[in-house]
Amino acid sequence: MTRLRSGEAAQQSKMHPSLPSVVAFDLGKVLLDFDYAIAARKISSRGALTPPQVRPLLECSPLLRRFESGFLTDEQFAVEVCSACGFSGTLNDFYAAFADIFWEIKPMIAVQAALRANGVPTCVFSNTNGIAVAHIRRRFPFFARFDAYVLSYQQGASKPDPKIYAALERMTGRTGEAILYLDDRAENVQAGLLRGWRAFQHETPEKTIPLLRQMGLPVSLNP
Ligand SMILES: [Mg+2]
């Protein structure tokens, strides 16, 4: 991944000296909503466990954390979960069931599009995994339109581990207040603030969009 072009930062600082020069978006619950209950129902329908028994294996297990931190391949994760659930489908059946849990948060996708159209670099900063990202790339065209991608499974570390924040700084060539970061999880936001980034906890587009506008960021295509 190449660094953002320095000209973009210069252009931004001319527009408004205190503007952040890159906006980092968490993915889940910021740009894409998701529900692991959807996957749990599909996997349960071809396995030995009930949906409430499957769901924690997918959503909050140490296995998922290791997978999203890059310590397991897609296949290793799938084999472990399929075995725990008695899943009778193929690996591809599992990948499809596991990944098809997302839908767009359209007002926030529109914010990213507006920033991009107005020359503000944007970055995806996500705890995620290869199965989900392959699906998201195929399904959601907006995902291709960022300047940088800092993804936990590729970095060998998950938020709020400082290693992945350092990776974002390396990949964007930005530090401190030049970075604005939005995430729905408080502990992840706190880790950004500790590095001197501007960061806040995203709750709803209705709360976030006015905050971005107050900072002077161009958040609509037709201001
Ligand atoms: Mg999130």
Image (cartoon, helix red, strand yellow):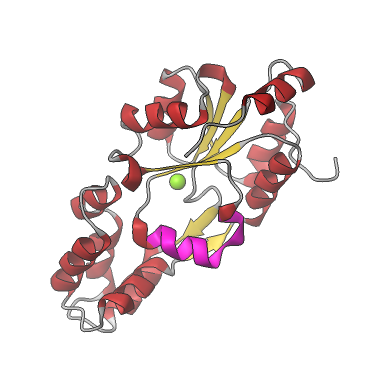
The percent coordinates of residue 144 (x first, y second) are 57, 54
Name the image quarter holding residue 208.
top right
Residue in the image at 85% along x and 40% along y: 223
Residue 210 at x, y percent in the picture: 71, 35
Q: Position of residue 206 (x, y in %)?
A: 67, 44
Foreground of the two, 19 or 45 = 19
Left or right: 142 as drawn, with respect to 158: right
Q: Is residue 140 magenta?
A: yes
Q: Position of residue 161 (x, y in %)?
A: 31, 31
Q: Main secondary structure of the magenta part?
A: helix
Residue 106 relative to residue 27: left or right: right
In-image side of 125 versus 219 (left or right): left
Q: Quadrant of residue 44?
A: bottom left
The residue sitting at 50% across, 50% down in the picture is: 29
Q: Which residues are magenta?
A: 132-143
Against 100, residue 120 (above or below) is above
Q: Relative to 83, say whether 129 is above or below.
A: above
Name the residue: 30% across, 49% down.
68
On screen, residue 11 above or below 213? above
Number of disc labels: 0
The reply to whether the magenta stretch includes residue 109 is no
Dividing the picture into quadrants, the one containing residue 100 is bottom left
Identify whether 202 is placed above or below 86: above
Q: Which residue is at the front of the view, 106 or 179?
A: 179
Residue furthest out toward the right: 222
